Amino acid sequence: MSNATTDYSDLKALYINGSIKKDKTKSHTQVLMNKSAKIMKSQGVDVEHIYLLDHAIAYGMIKDGKEDGQADDWPMIQQKIMAADILVIGSPIWLGVKSSVATLLIERMYAYSGDRNDKGQYLYYGKTGGCIITGNEDGIKHCAMDILYALQHIGYMVPPQADCGWIGEAGSGASYGDTEWDGKKIDPPTGFDNDFTNRNTTFMAWNLMHTARMLKDNGGIPEVGNTTEGWQNVANAKSDNP
């Protein structure tokens, strides 16, 4: 289905995969991220993918690890984050929580929490974010809760149904997108016929586009009451209500 009334072609979306597999072609999370990205591309959104393990990412609450003598591609990634209207973070589930790589991603983003936009708001105001989770154990909602809380805390707008995911049976088994398991062919690929996953993936992609469109058209979030220098001016505003 196409939306004929709204133009999304000036929006940019950045998908960052926090998989712990060094070989991105083996990432099941990437398969579901690609499905979400395809929806946005079909509406003209400029979509870019980053596989975090393709890059050297320094540890620490720092903006540039090279200043500490570490190899660090983060400044380049941060530029792409700032250029994007939409950020989607992908993560597998391990021991019920998001990956260490996804945690590192959020830590590095948080290092910029002291910076401000041109309105004096937190740097990420005016952007919208979501997440995609896959695994073979319980934890989709827990991982999503963790990631989406972090995004909204640093300034992102989180729309309704801003997460999607897929989990198989507990324990070892076929993972999302697998076409073979235990010597047996799987058709369609694992999870592709799961209505819950397909519905939520669709809702997430569209709600992120809708929210990004509204934010861009309205110049982001109004600065009244949420700037670091001006909040006290309106904190005790008079009201007829008790």
Image: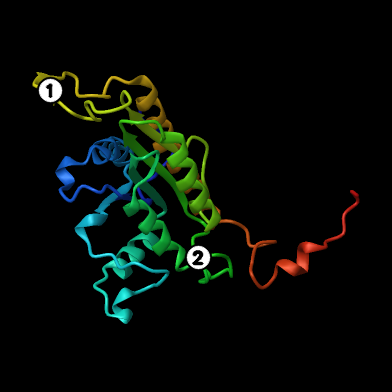
Is residue 42 in view from this perspective?
A: yes
Task: Give the residue drawn at x 41%, y 57%.
Answer: 106
Q: Under tag 2, what secondary structure? A: loop
Quarter of the image that includes the N terminus = top left
Where is residue 164? Give x, y as percent. 40, 34
Of labels 1 and 2, the one closer to you: 1
- Closer to the camera, 109 or 124? 109
The colour scheme used here is rainbow
In terms of image quadrants, where is residue 60?
bottom left
* Label 1 environment density (alpha carbons within 10 Å; few <14, some 14–19, many ≥20): few
Is residue 13 in view from this perspective?
A: no
Where is residue 2? Give x, y as percent. 36, 30
- Residue of label 2: 123
Task: Give the residue drawn at x 36%, y 57%.
Answer: 105
The dot on residue 182 is: 1
Tell whether 122 sits left or right of 196: right
Q: Where 4 sits versus 147, above or below?
A: above
Q: Disc 2 marks which amino acid?
A: Leu
Q: Disc 1 marks which amino acid?
A: Asp
Where is residue 88? Give x, y as percent. 37, 47
Q: Where 195 sits versus 232, above or below?
A: above
- Closer to the camera, 4 or 215? 215
Q: Earlier in the sequence, mark 1 or mark 2?
A: 2
Q: Under tag 1, what secondary structure? A: loop
Q: Where 227 sits versus 50, above or below?
A: below
